[in-house]
Image (cartoon, grey):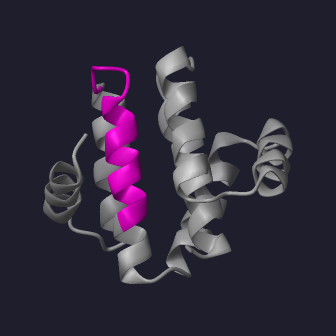
């Protein structure tokens, strides 16, 4: 089971990634719920997160997500960015904003983008 820091960091960054294009489509919402299930994120934690982001600015969400991920292991950070990479692909097109967000995020969290892509492809899409 992944740590609470991993789960919260992943939720924060997932929210930012899916809202970067200005809207959340059905595939993106389904992808978030699949991540919630796969990573055993409790309903309580998910609901707390959803309440919090309603009152938070984008910058605050990014800073909080980065703080949570900074407390994770290297493996957890890699797993988080693999999820984010797959999430970016879920709406069948990756925008320039999504690419910039992912590249900046992996650099800030000291994760290799090549490792993210390789791991995502090995895990299947």
Quarter the C terminus occupies: top left
Q: Nearer the viewer, residue 15 or 44?
A: 44
* Residue 84 is a magenta residue: yes
Q: Is residue 25 above or below residue 87?
A: above
Q: Is residue 17 above or below residue 1?
A: above
Q: Nearer the viewer, residue 60 or 80?
A: 80
Q: Quadrant of residue 73?
A: bottom left
Image x and y of residue 27, in percent: 47, 21
Residue at left 40%, top 47%?
Answer: 84
Q: Which residues are magenta?
A: 79-94
Residue at left 67%, top 72%?
Answer: 4
- Residue 101 visible in the displayed image: yes
Residue 114 vs residue 44: left or right?
left
Q: Main secondary structure of the magenta part?
A: helix
Quarter the N terminus occupies: bottom right
* Residue 3 is a magenta residue: no
Residue at left 75%, top 49%?
Answer: 46
């Amino acid at each position: 089971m992944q740590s609470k820091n991993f789960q919260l960091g992943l939720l924060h960054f997932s929210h930012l990634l899916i809202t970067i294009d200005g809207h959340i489509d059905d595939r993106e919402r389904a992808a978030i719920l699949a991540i919630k299930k796969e990573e055993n994120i409790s309903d309580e934690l998910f609901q707390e997160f959803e309440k919090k982001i309603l009152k938070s600015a984008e910058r605050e969400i990014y800073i909080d997500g980065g703080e949570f991920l900074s407390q994770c292991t290297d493996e957890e950070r890699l797993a988080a960015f693999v999820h984010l990479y797959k999430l970016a692909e879920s709406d069948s097109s990756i925008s320039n904003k999504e690419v910039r967000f992912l590249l900046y995020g992996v650099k800030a969290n000291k994760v290799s983008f090549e490792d993210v892509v390789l791991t995502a492809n090995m895990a299947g899409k």
